[in-house]
Image (cartoon, rainbow, N blue to C red):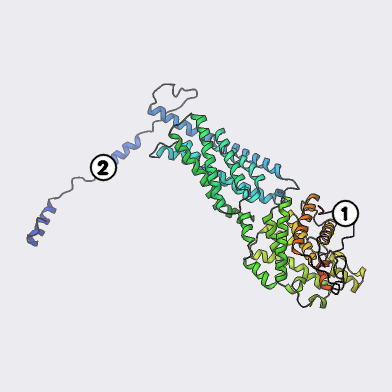
Amino acid sequence: QPLLKDINYDLVNLAVNFVQKLIQPNITLNANETEERKRAVEKIKPVLHKIKAGEMLLREGEIITKVQLLKLKNLQAQTNKEHILAISIGATMIMLCLLIFTYILHINHNSRFARNHNKNLIAMACMLITILLFARVFAPLSEALAQNSTFAISSSSIIFGIPIASGAMIICLLLGLDIAIPFAMVTAACTAVIFQSSFEIFIYFLLNSAMAAYWIQNCRERKVFIKAGLKIGLLNIVLSTAISVYLSGFLGFKILEVWVFAFMGGIGAGIVTAGIAPLFEIAFGYTTDITLLELANLERPIIRQLMLEAPGTYHHSVIVGNMVEAAAVEIGANPLLAKACGYYHDIGKIKKPLYFIENQKNGKNKHDKLAPSMSKHILVAHVKDGVEIAKQNKLGLVIIDTIRQHHGTSLISYFYEKAKKQKGEDAVKIDDFRYPGPKPQTKEAGLVMLADVVEAASRALDNPTPARIQGLVQNLINKIFSDGQIDNCELTLKDLHNIAKTFNRILSGIHHHRIDYPEKSSSINGKVKDESPDRQQAKQSQDFSGNGTEEGSGHLKRLGLS
C-alpha cells in the first residue's frame, strides 16, 4: 500500500514541493570547453598508409594486424573500381556475342523464328536481362546472408537456389524448345560470368535450364509449372550433390543445406515462370498453348454468339476445327493452335450472316438482288470484320493473322463468272474479284484454308461416298496448290498427302452413305447439281468445284490415296 495513503493531501503537497527544491542538476553545458575540444579534433590529421608498388603486404603464416587488414580491404576496393568498366564492357560483349550466335543459328527465311525475328530477339533480350538481374541481386545477397545468418550457411549453397531455369522455361513457352535450348546456354554462360567465371555454375544452370525447357514444352495447364518445378528441384539436388562432392568432398550433414536450397531453386523456377510468363505473353503478343486451350472452349461468348446468329457458320467452323486438329497431328504442326484458328476463322460472318450460303433459309439468296461487285465486297468484308472482332475479344495475334490469311488471294469465281456474263469478259478484271490476302504464312493457316474450302464443298456433294469425297478432296487441294495459295506456309508435298488422307477419313465419317432415290437424283457422278444455285455458290464462291477430272501441269496426282 502507498505510504502516503492515509496522510492529509496538504502535507503530501508540502513534502513534494520540499523534495523538488532539493533536486539540483549536476551536469551543465560548458560551451568554452566544447569548442576547445572541437578545434582539437579538427587539428588532428588523418593517418594515411601509402602502399608502394612491389610492397609486401602479408607473408604466408604471418598474423594479420589491423593495419594490414585495412590495407588489403582498400586495395581490393580500389582494384574493383579500376576494373569495373572493363568487366562491364567484357560481360556485355560476351552476352551480345551469345545472343548474336543464337540469332544466326535460328534466323533463316524458312524458320518460324524468322517471321517475327525482331520481336523475338527483343523478347529474348528482355528475358535475359530479367534473369541476369536475378543473378546479380542474388550474388551479393548470398554473401550477406552467409555472413549474417544465425546458422552457418555457405554462400555457394544459396547460389543453388537461384531460379535461373525460369528463363528457359518462359522462352520455351513463347518460342519453342528449339529456341529455349540455345537460350539456356546463353543464360548459363552469363550467370557463370557473374559468379566469377565458375565452370561448375555454368554446368549446373545449363543442365537444369535445358531440362526445365524440355519438361515444359507441351504445357497446356498451369499446374504443369509446379510439376516441372518439382522435377527441376529433384534434378538440382542431384547436380548440386555432384558439384559439392567434386569441389569439397563428402560434406556429411552439411549436404542437407545444399539440398534444401537446390530444391527451393526448382520450386522457385516454377513459381517465377507462372508469374512472369503471362506478362511476357501480353507485352509481346504471344499466344501460348495454355491460352489456346482457353480459346478453344466452345462456351466462350463469341463462339456462342456465332452459334446463335450464324448457326451454319458455327457448325462449319466446328468441323473445320476438328479437321485441322487431326491433320496438324499428322504433319507435325500445332494441333491446339490449328483447332483454335479453325473455330474463329469465320467469326466475321456474324455481322452479315444471311449473306452466306450456309446460313440462308428457305432457298432465299440475298445475292440474287445484288450486283456481283457488291456481293464480292460483302464476302471480302467478312475477313476484315473477323479481324476487328478478334481484336475486340483479344484472341491473340496468331489467330488474327490466320483470320486475315485463310482465303489468301483466291478468286471468288462464282461472282466473277456472273459479272462476266453481265458486263462481258473484257469489262471485268480478275484481280477485282480476289481476296486481298495475304496468303497463309504458317502451316496452321494453310490447314485452315484447305479445310475451309474442302468442308464447304463437301456439303454440296450429292451422295457423298468415300470415293467421291476422295476425288473432291484431291481436286480441291490440287487447285489451291496450282493457284499458289500455299506457297508461303511451309507445307510439303508429303504434308499435303497426309492432309488429304486425314480429310478423307473425317469427311467420310461425317457424310454417311445414303440411298440414291431415282426421282430425287439428278447427278450420277457425285457432282453438284447444276440447277441448284445455292450449292453452286457454296463451292464456286471459294473458287473451286467438285469436278475431279481436270489435271493440269501443276496438279498433284493420287493425292491422299492410300
Q: Residue at 43% across / 29% down in the picture?
A: 71
Q: Quadrant of residue 545?
A: bottom right
Above or below, comparing residue 335 to residue 26 in the picture: below
Q: Is residue 43 visible?
A: yes
Q: What amino acid type is highlighted by mark number 1?
A: Gly
Closer to the chain start, of discs 2 and 1, is: 2
Q: Quadrant of residue 514?
A: bottom right
Label 2 SS: helix
Q: What amino acid type is highlighted by mark number 2?
A: Asn
Dot 1: few (<14), some (14–19), or many (≥20) neighbours within 10 Å? Answer: few
Above or below, comparing residue 267 to residue 449 in the picture: above
Q: Is residue 280 left or right of residue 465?
A: left
| Residue 539 vs residue 163, the one in the foreground | 539
Q: Is residue 263 left or right of residue 523?
A: left
Q: Residue at 18% across / 45% down in the picture?
A: 26
| Residue 511 vs residue 500, the one in the foreground | 511
Above or below, comparing residue 292 to residue 251 in the picture: below
- The residue labelled by disc 1 is 554
| Residue 459 vs residue 478, the one in the foreground | 459
In which quadrant of the rendered image does the N terminus lie?
bottom left
| Residue 213 vs residue 154, the one in the foreground | 213
Dot 2: few (<14), some (14–19), or many (≥20) neighbours within 10 Å? Answer: few
Q: Residue at 61% across / 60% down in the picture?
A: 294
Above or below, comparing residue 200 to residue 463 in the picture: above
How many marks do you count on the picture? 2
- The residue labelled by disc 2 is 32
Separation (CA) of disc 2 from disc 1: 109 Å
